Amino acid sequence: MERPALDDYFMKIADVVASRSTCLRRHAGTVLVRDKRILSTGYNGVPKGLPHCDVTGCPREKCDSGTRHELCRAVHSEQNAIIQAALHGVSTEDATLYCTHQPCTLCAKMVINAGITRVVYREEYPDNSSLAFLDQAGVEIVRVR
């Protein structure tokens, strides 16, 4: 068996993390890494202690992808990974964010302010302004397939 490259390795872990998602529309997973070590993970789902969308229904059910984020009950996987790092006192400075999906604009702003310097993702997202934000901030962006 051939040893996977680091980007492939951490993206496979992001896929496993995404399998915990409780979102009815999209299962996303994120892994934050620095120096080949996992700092934290996150998947998209409602805030802790609240009923999942399979119980309440999805308020964005009829919305186009990438629109009306304010209606969504879920916290994005990137946000959850950054929050988990903060809760446990783990710095995200100079980390790489591996995500199953391209970050949205809100997550891109959090990535920038969290000091994350590299984003690796697979699936495109309909809102490309996030890529412009990341690029302007000097964050390296890599799309893997």
Image (spheres, helix red, strand yellow):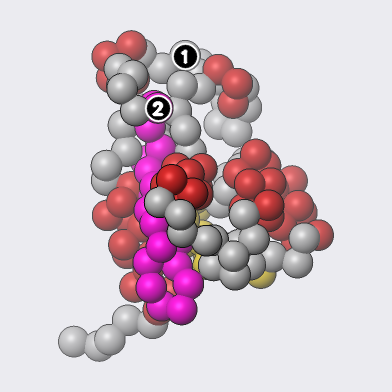
Q: Is residue 70 visible?
A: yes
Task: Name the amino acid type tagged 2.
Answer: Pro
* Residue at the (34%, 28%) spot, across then down: 48
**Along the line of sight, which residue is nearer the eye, 134 or 121?**
134
Tell me the element at label 1: loop
The range drawn in magenta is 27-47
Q: What label sits on residue 47 in the rendered view?
A: 2
Task: Name the amino acid type tagged 1.
Answer: Pro
If you read the primary sequence from the N terminus, does the residue marked by circle 2 or circle 1 appear first?
A: 2
Label 2, label 1: how many angstroms apart (C-alpha)?
A: 15 Å
**Along the line of sight, which residue is nearer the eye, 112 or 7?**
112
Image coordinates for residue 10, horizontal then vertical, percent? 37, 68
Decide whether the magenta segment is chiefly helix, strand or loop. Answer: strand
* Residue at the (41%, 17%) spot, across then down: 58
Q: What label sits on residue 59 in the rendered view?
A: 1
**Along the line of sight, which residue is nearer the eye, 52 or 94?**
94
Residue found at the very far front of the displayed protein: 89
Residue found at the very far bottom of the displayed protein: 2
* Residue at the (46%, 54%) spot, across then down: 89
